[in-house]
């Protein structure tokens, strides 16, 4: 191939929340090089080992290029066979139409997974289909993840997307709970190159304090690390607030002009002493006091908590307490504390604030949030007979059989449906149940503007990149599949189809009318971003309150009755004795769906049950044996790995494994099957306040074999 075929493309990696800029070299239809974009103002050249797998995803022979239909073979087995797009879209649309006509709209269930917020066309065009299907049975990965963050932002700041972002580059004290950004690259916190940023914090004399039942890669880097009993963080955080009030360390600064509810908070924590918390958490009372004092004295401080404190029994209470700590120490909306972003495409001012508990699930009365029910209720909504029972399931960019609690039950329940449609490039543990699979173009075949994660980024920047490759003839983007289905469904139901424009036109409109658009000096548009392919920097985060608050009165609300009541639930809770199972992320994994790339699967096996050496010895076991891990819902077997990284009484297993099932098409993943920890996480174990799944802190018993 001649030199002239070599082209250089700028691109943003969409695989995780870090939004790293990459430079991709291609030769004809081949990717020949992927590296960090030094000129990206946010990521500054950083990439993690997953960036190169953009090539592997594109080239993966198992990636579906044409729709699949499930048929029965002569032997009675199911098998997926390729069909043409028209047939597939007609089949899917007519199944939805007849389900609605027969049972009503709630008989259609939908689950959207994590990549649906990393693919902008999925965000902009879902409504082209779902405006015709206003079902109550919508679910997403949000409720196995960050739902408590949204709920608390809605309550305290008036909008579910108004999320304070840790200003790591200017802070002096960082109190981090239940997060491992060195593996995850940050979450609800777009912070590429996080290792360097945390090292810089320490180099300028600042402190990083990590609270985690495992001594993670991030904890290794920290100034101090404390083990904490899984699920007990709320006690720790409330005791910190107690000390702040008790020792007169409340100092709201500018926030005092527009913050309500302090008295109620003070009253609620008045008995929740460090001694009380020490007994529950395993962190000494003197350490809790010292942390509260150090935090309040720091020139600027951040309290931040992620998966480990969201997906546990007190997720919303934890996230609320974190906000209270930031507010009452005057660290919200302050450089070096936690600030709101002002993204070029501002979802906060352009989307509805969200709502909570306007209806609830039929089976267990779990509350909706933003018109979604908790994923932990999905199985019973498929299985419980009566009006509103799900008969047809639509999954988009999700693998809930591996990612939601009690995956075994879901695996069975999906088989009981009358019809299932999956919008997904993979024939995996979930989509193998689908009657029709609709595969979109590969990420490198469509353009990208990150609508979601600029809202969570440590700097205000914007970046748009056109496709790297032309799509093959006939292939459809995710957004076009929604349009095609929506138009067909409208036609079948006699409804008005929704008009549509390509996503980049919608984004262009939003950019032009946004804070850096036509009315500003920046004059940001898609065209301007194309001319600046590494992105444009609008600078560090700025204080923006009270204007930015979305509460009706532009005031911060700390006294939330639902939360204050939840403190009683915590006080009365007596956790059962036993081992507690927690999760674990590795930098070369990405939930369940990137195990089919050899480059990422090299090295030591990762799906092992980590257990403290003292516990291993007490049980009379050694590393390498198989252990059965049993919970209320089932059991799995995993290889034991003794490690003092985890605290005694805690075992850790990553999620997203459990491959090797019949009817799937992922050759490499199936050679590294592992087990699915969500086969034993419990759909009944939720944060009762928010309905978020508690996949961390699951009570398990262990036996050899
Ligand atoms: N025990 C336990 N469970 C967990 C977690 C945990 O820490 N512990 N973490 C939870 C969290 S935070 C999350 S976010 C969820 C993730 O849960 P899910 O989102 O349900 O699962 P993923 O593994 O991310 O599956 C992504 C699917 O999207 C498909 N996909 C990838 N890109 C595209 C695209 O561009 N378009 C389309 N249409 N499809 C695409 C992939 O092929 C794959 O099938 O798991 C949750 N489950
Ligand atoms: N490499 C990689 N990166 C990813 C992903 C991935 O799968 N792989 N997934 C992406 C997604 S979807 C998300 S949501 C983010 C998640 O991003 P993070 O939340 O930063 O990642 P986790 O590794 O899940 O960190 C959770 C931590 O909580 C700890 N923990 C568990 N239970 C408790 C508890 O009760 N209390 C406390 N204090 N800690 C606890 C765990 O030991 C773990 O260290 O990562 C994203 N980035
Ligand atoms: S950190 Fe995330 S965004 Fe950056 S290269 Fe890795 S996967 Fe891509
Ligand atoms: Mo997530």
Image (cartoon, grey):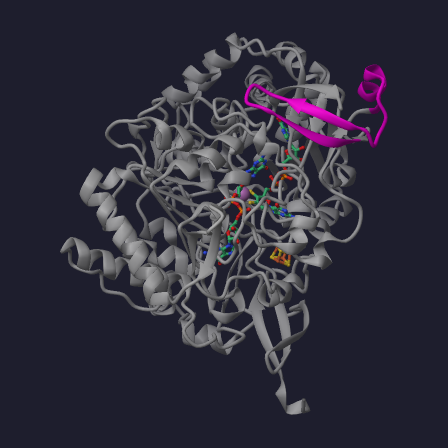
Depth check, front residue: 167 or 664? 664
Q: Is residue 130 left or right of residue 306?
A: left
Asked which quadrant contains residue 296, the reply is top right
> Dividing the picture into quarters, in which one does residue 534 lie?
bottom right
Compared with residue 471, is residue 335 higher up or lower down, i.e. above or below? above
**Residue at point 70% right, 16% down?**
282
Q: Which residues are magenta?
A: 613-640
Between 399 and 183, the one lying in front of the other is: 399
Image height of 269 relative to 655, above or below = above
Q: Quadrant of the N terminus?
A: bottom right
Q: Quadrant of residue 621?
A: top right
Apparent side of residue 196 relative to residue 498 in the rendered image (left or right): right
Residue at 52 percent of width and 53 percent of height: 427
Q: Position of residue 542 (x, y in %)?
A: 50, 51
Q: In the current view of this chain or complex, which residue is farthest to the left?
A: 494
* Apparent side of residue 395 relative to residue 632 in the rendered image (left or right): left
Q: Is residue 245 magenta?
A: no
x and y percentages locating residue 704 in the rendered image: 77, 21
Whether residue 625 is in magenta: the answer is yes
Q: Residue 407's spot in the image, x, y percent?
A: 52, 34
Looking at the picture, tell me which residue is in the foreground, 161 or 423: 423
Is residue 673 in sight in this rendering? yes
Which residue occupies the foreground of this view, 256 or 84? 84
Instruction: Indicate which quadrant contains ligand 4.
Output: top right
| Residue 517 vertical placement versus 330 (above, below) | below
- On the question of residue 512 being in view, the answer is no
User: Could you tell me which residue is drawn at 41 percent across and 73 percent down?
Assistant: 474
């Amino acid at each position: 191939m001649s030199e002239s075929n070599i082209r250089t493309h700028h691109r943003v990696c969409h695989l995780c929340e870090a939004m790293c800029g990459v430079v991709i070299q291609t030769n004809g239809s081949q990717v020949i090089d992927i590296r960090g974009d030094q000129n990206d103002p946010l990521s500054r050249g950083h990439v993690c080992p997953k960036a190169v797998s953009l090539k592997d995803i594109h080239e993966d022979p198992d990636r579906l290029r044409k729709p699949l239909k499930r048929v029965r073979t002569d032997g009675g087995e199911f098998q997926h066979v390729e069909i043409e797009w028209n047939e597939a879209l007609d089949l899917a649309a007519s199944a939805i139409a007849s389900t609605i006509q027969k049972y009503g709209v709630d008989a259609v269930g939908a689950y959207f997974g994590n990549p649906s917020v990393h693919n902008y066309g999925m965000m902009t065009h879902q409504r082209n289909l779902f405006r015709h299907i206003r079902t109550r049975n919508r679910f997403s990965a949000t409720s196995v993840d960050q739902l408590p963050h949204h709920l608390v932002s809605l309550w305290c700041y008036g909008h579910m997307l108004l999320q304070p972002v840790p200003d790591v580059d200017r802070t002096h004290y960082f109190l981090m709970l239940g997060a491992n950004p060195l593996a995850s690259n940050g979450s609800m916190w777009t912070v590429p190159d996080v290792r360097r940023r945390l090292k810089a914090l320490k180099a300028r004399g600042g402190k990083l304090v990590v609270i985690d039942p495992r001594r993670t890669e991030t904890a290794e880097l920290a100034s101090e690390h404390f083990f904490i009993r899984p699920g007990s963080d709320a006690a720790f955080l409330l005791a910190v607030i107690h000390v702040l009030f008790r020792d007169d360390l409340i100092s709201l600064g500018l926030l005092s002009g527009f913050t309500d509810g302090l008295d109620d908070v003070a009253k609620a924590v008045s008995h929740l002493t460090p001694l009380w918390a020490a007994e529950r958490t395993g962190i000494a009372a003197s350490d809790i006091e010292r942390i509260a004092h150090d935090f309040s004295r720091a020139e600027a401080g951040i309290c931040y908590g992620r998966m480990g404190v969201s997906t546990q029994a007190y997720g919303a209470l934890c996230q609320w307490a974190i906000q209270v700590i930031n507010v009452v120490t005057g660290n919200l909306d302050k450089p070096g504390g936690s600030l709101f972003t002002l993204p070029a495409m501002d979802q906060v001012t352009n989307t509805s604030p969200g709502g909570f508990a306007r209806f609830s699930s039929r089976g267990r009365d779990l509350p909706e949030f933003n018109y979604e029910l908790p994923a932990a209720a999905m199985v019973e909504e498929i299985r419980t007979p009566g009006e509103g029972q799900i008969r047809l399931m639509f999954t988009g960019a999700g693998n809930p059989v591996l990612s939601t609690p009690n995956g075994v039950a879901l695996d069975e329940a999906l088989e009981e449906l009358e019809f299932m449609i999956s919008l997904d490039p993979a024939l995996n543990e979930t989509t193998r149940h689908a009657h029709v699979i609709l595969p979109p173009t590969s990420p490198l075949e469509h353009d990208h503007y990150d609508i979601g994660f600029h809202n969570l980024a440590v700097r205000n920047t914007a970046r748009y990149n056109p496709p790297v490759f032309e799509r093959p003839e006939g292939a459809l983007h995710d957004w076009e599949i929604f349009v095609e289905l929506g138009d067909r469904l409208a036609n079948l139901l006699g409804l008005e189809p929704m008009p549509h424009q390509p996503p980049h036109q919608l984004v262009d409109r939003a950019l032009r009318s946004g804070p850096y658009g036509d009315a500003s000096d920046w004059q940001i548009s898609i065209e301007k971003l194309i001319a600046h392919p590494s992105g444009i920097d609008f600078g560090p985060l700025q204080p923006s309150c009270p204007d930015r608050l979305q509460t009706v009165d532009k005031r911060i609300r700390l006294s939330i009755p639902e939360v204050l009541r939840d403190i009683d639930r915590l006080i009365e809770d007596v956790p059962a004795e036993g081992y507690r199972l927690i999760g674990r992320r590795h930098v070369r994994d990405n939930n369940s769906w990137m195990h089919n790339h050899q480059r990422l699967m090299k090295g030591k096996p990762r799906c092992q049950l980590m257990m403290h050496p003292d516990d291993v010895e007490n049980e009379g076991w050694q590393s390498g044996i198989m252990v059965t891990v049993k919970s209320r819902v089932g059991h799995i077997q995993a290889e034991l790995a003794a490690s003092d990284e985890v605290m005694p009484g805690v075992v850790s297993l990553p999620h997203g494994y459990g491959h090797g099932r019949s009817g799937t098409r992922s050759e490499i993943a199936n050679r590294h099957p592992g087990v699915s920890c969500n086969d034993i996480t419990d759909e009944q174990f939720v944060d009762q306040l928010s309905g978020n799944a508690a996949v961390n802190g699951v009570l398990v018993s262990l036996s050899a074999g």
